[in-house]
Image (tube, rainbow, N blue to C red):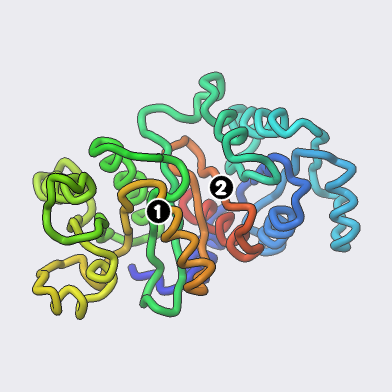
Amino acid sequence: MVIRNLSGLLEIARKKSVQKLVVAAAEGEHVFKAAIKAKNENIITPIFIGNKERIIELADKLKINTSEIEIINNKDKAGACYEAFQLVSEGKADIVMKGLVNTSTFLKALLDKKFGLVKDSILSHLAIFETAFYHKIIGVTDAAINIAPGLKDKAEIIKNAVDAFIKLGVDTPRVGVLAAIEKINPKMKATVHASKLKIMCETRQLKNCIIDGPLALDNAVSQSAARHKGIESNVAGEVDILVTPDINSGNILYKSLNFLGGAVSAALVLGASVPVILTSRADSDQSKFMSIVFAVAIK
C-alpha cells in the first residue's frame, strides 16, 4: 500500500480502537490543542498530567470543557513524566506524549528499568513527512535519539522504522541509506555503513525491506537524478525511509523539510513497548496532532 499523504494515517487510526493517551507536562498550549483535536476525532481519550491550574486556565482560554477529562496535578516536570510512564506500565494508558518538558527529562523516565518499557531493541526516532515535492509520505531516521550510531545501531534503527511502515500497510519498505557520495570511501564511515547494511539486507540479516546505499539524497528521492549519475537502484525515486549518518544530518534534514520545504511531519520514538510521541517545541499544532494519529495508527 502507498500512503500518499498524512491524512491516510488518520483513515488507518479511525479503524483502530480508541487509545488512552497520557501527556506529561500537559500545560503547553500546542500539545494540549493537539490532544483535544485527537479526542474530537475519537481516536484517543486523553489523560493530562501537569500543573492542573494552568491546564484548566488553558482549557478555559480555548473554551474547552474539562469536566469529563482526567487531569492529574503534578507541578514537577520530572514527576509528571514518571507518573505518565507509571500509568503505561500499569496498563492504564496506551501511548505517552511529551508536553512542556525537556527531552532529556522525558527520556530519562522512559528508560527507568522499573517500568520495563524498553527491552531488547534500542530506541530510535522516526519522522514521516508529507511534502509537495514527493509523491508519498517519506520517513527520516534518526533525528533525535542516536547521536553517532554504529553499524549495529543503524541495523536496529532500520528494523524499528521498517516495522512501523509495515504496520501502516507498506509491505516491503524501501530504505535509502544516505551519505554525501554514492561510492564507498573508507574515510567516510557513512558510506561503509551503507554498503554493509545493503549486504545485510541481501543476506536476509535485515528482513522485510529493500535497502540500497550509499545514496546521496538526490539519488534516493529521484530516479532521474540516479539515472543521470549512472546509478541503477530499485530504491531511487521510490524510497520510503531515509537513514541519515548521524543525529546532526538527521536533525538538519528534519528541520529543513519542515521550515524550508513546507512539509508537515509526524514523529515517534520507536523501540519501546508502546508508542512514544516526541515532538519539537517548535513543531506546529498540526505536526503534534499528526504524531498522535501516527501513534494510534501503528498500535
In the displayed structure, 267 sits above or below 54; it is: below
Q: Nearer the viewer, mark 2 or mark 1?
A: 1
Mark 2 element type: strand
Q: Is residue 172 visible?
A: no
Q: Can residue 239 be seen from the camera position used here?
A: yes
Give the residue drawn at x 51%, y 20%.
Answer: 113
The mark total stands at: 2
In percent of the image, x 81 and y 41: which residue is there?
Answer: 71
Element on which disc 1 rests: helix
**Rendered view: 69 above or below 181:** above
Q: Quadrant of the N terminus?
A: bottom left
Compared to residue 191, the image places residue 85 above or below, namely above
Q: The residue under label 2 is which amino acid type?
A: Ile
What is the x, y in percent for residue 120? 36, 28
Q: Residue furthest top?
A: 114
Foreground residue among 125 and 202? 125
For this view, does 250 lie left or right of residue 104? left
Q: Which residue is mark 2?
A: 277
Disc on the earlier residue, 2 or 1: 1
Looking at the picture, which amino acid does disc 1 mark?
Gly
Q: Label 1: which residue?
A: 250
Residue 65: percent from the left, percent from the top?
87, 57
When asked about the image quadrant of residue 134, the answer is bottom left
Q: Is residue 104 above or below residue 270?
A: above
- The quarter holding residue 30 reads bottom right
Q: Residues within 10 Å of mark 1 (few under 14, many from 20)?
A: many
